Image: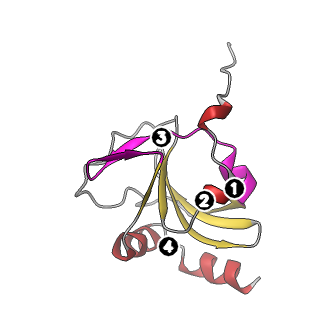
């Protein structure tokens, strides 16, 4: 099996990651950063091999458990620019209602509260 090379040009820097940002990985998986505290963050992952989201769609995190990881680990993934409401960028800021929808879909309230209490 051939190992694919990672393209470090597609990686984020830790300073570029913010709560409420939506990212799209090279595995065609969306990730929404829900909370950050210190070196850790909570994010919602979607299924892999997703079609690009239309601008008016709901968040794609239903039945996906929230994940906790170090910010550095999150940053060292490959991300793609994607079109969101007519703007192409590597990350897009979600509205408060979209963030609330993502938190509700992956049932992350308790996990976020735990992270913020650390």
Are there few (<14), some (14-19), or many (20+) residues within 10 Å of tag 4? Answer: some
Whichever of labels 2 and 3 marks the residue nearer the N terminus, that label is 2
How much space separates mark 1 and mark 2, taking CA atoms? 6 Å
Mark whose residue sits in front, 4 or 1: 1
Mark number displayed over residue 48:
3
Q: Is residue 3 magenta?
A: no
User: In the figure, 18 relative to 47: above or below?
Assistant: below
Which residue does the numbered mark 4 point to in the structure image? Answer: 107
Q: In terms of depth relative to the viewer, which is nearer, 63 or 67?
A: 67
Q: Quadrant of residue 10?
A: top right
Q: CA distance from mark 3 to mark 4?
A: 19 Å
The residue tagged 1 is 14
Helix, strand or loop for disc 2 = loop
Kindly state the secondary structure of the residue where label 4 is placed.
loop
**Is residue 30 left or right of 3 when viewed as pictured?**
left
- Magenta residues? 70-90
Q: What residue is rendered at 40% in x and 61% in y?
A: 62
The residue lying at 60 percent from left, 59 percent from top is 17
Label 2 sits on residue: 17
- Looking at marks 4 and 1 on the same chain, the residue that comes earlier in the sequence is marked by 1
């Amino acid at each position: 099996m051939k190992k694919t090379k990672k393209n470090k040009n597609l990686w984020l820097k830790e300073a570029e990651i913010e709560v409420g940002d939506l990212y799209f990985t090279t595995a065609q998986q969306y990730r929404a950063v829900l909370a950050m505290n210190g070196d850790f963050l909570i994010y919602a992952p979607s299924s892999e091999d997703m079609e690009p989201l239309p601008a008016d769609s709901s968040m794609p995190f239903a039945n996906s458990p929230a994940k906790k990881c170090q910010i550095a680990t999150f940053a060292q993934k490959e991300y793609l620019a994607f079109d969101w409401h007519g703007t192409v960028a590597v990350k897009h800021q979600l509205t408060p209602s979209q963030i609330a929808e993502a938190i509700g879909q992956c049932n992350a309230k308790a996990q976020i509260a735990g992270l913020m209490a650390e």
